[in-house]
Image (tube, helix red, strand yellow):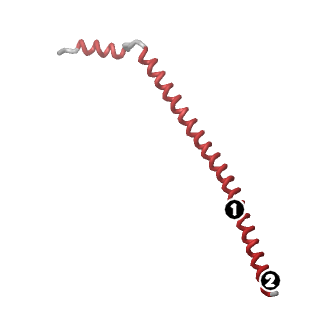
Amino acid sequence: MAARRVRTSKRIVVAVSVLLCGVILVLGWLSYRSVKEVVTEDFNQQQLVLAKYAARQISHSLAMLRKELQLLGRPPRCSTRSGSLLSAASRAPS
């Protein structure tokens, strides 16, 4: 009778241990999936922020280039100030 109780106790301990291991594995897997979703979403948000920043920088650079090209496309103007300096310099005694 005592041997039978020992066997039954061992079977119960093994069954409970297997059940607990199964529960731990399932909880670990669910936790893994949840963390993976959160990390993926955070990564995507960070990439979106970086892409928007890069787009703003490119737009800004293109706007600056457009302004510079417009300035370079204009004919040069002589201002009265530089004209008077040139005429004053040409009149100076040598």
| Residue 40, position as x, y percentages in the image | 63, 47
Which of the 4 image quarters holds residue 83?
top left
Camera-nearest residue between 50 and 94? 50
Please identify the residue farthest to the bottom as the structure is shown: 2
Camera-nearest residue between 87 and 23? 23
Name the secondary structure under disc 2: helix
Which of the 4 image quarters holds residue 77?
top left
User: Around disc 1, counting alpha carbons within 10 Å, would you say few (fewer than 14), some (14 to 19), or many (20 or more)?
Assistant: few
Residue occupying image coordinates x 24% and y 13%: 90
**Left or right: 72, with 51 as reference point:** left
Residue occupying image coordinates x 56% and y 39%: 50
Amino acid on which disc 1 is placed? Leu
Residue occupying image coordinates x 64% and y 51%: 36
Looking at the figure, which quarter contains the C terminus?
A: top left
User: Around disc 2, counting alpha carbons within 10 Å, would you say few (fewer than 14), some (14 to 19), or many (20 or more)?
Assistant: few
Q: Does the CB distance between marks 2 and 1 fall below 8 Å?
A: no
Amino acid on which disc 2 is placed? Arg
Q: Which residue is mark 1?
A: 25
Camera-nearest residue between 62 and 36? 36
Name the secondary structure under disc 1: helix
Q: Which residue is mark 2?
A: 5
| Residue 93, position as x, y percentages in the image | 19, 14
Q: Earlier in the sequence, mark 2 or mark 1?
A: 2
| Residue 61, position as x, y percentages in the image | 48, 29
Q: Which mark is residue 86?
A: none
| Residue 64, position as x, y percentages in the image | 48, 26
Residue 74 sits above or below residue 39 on the image: above
Camera-nearest residue between 42 and 58? 42
Q: What is the CA distance from the residue labelled 2 to the residue labelled 1?
A: 30 Å
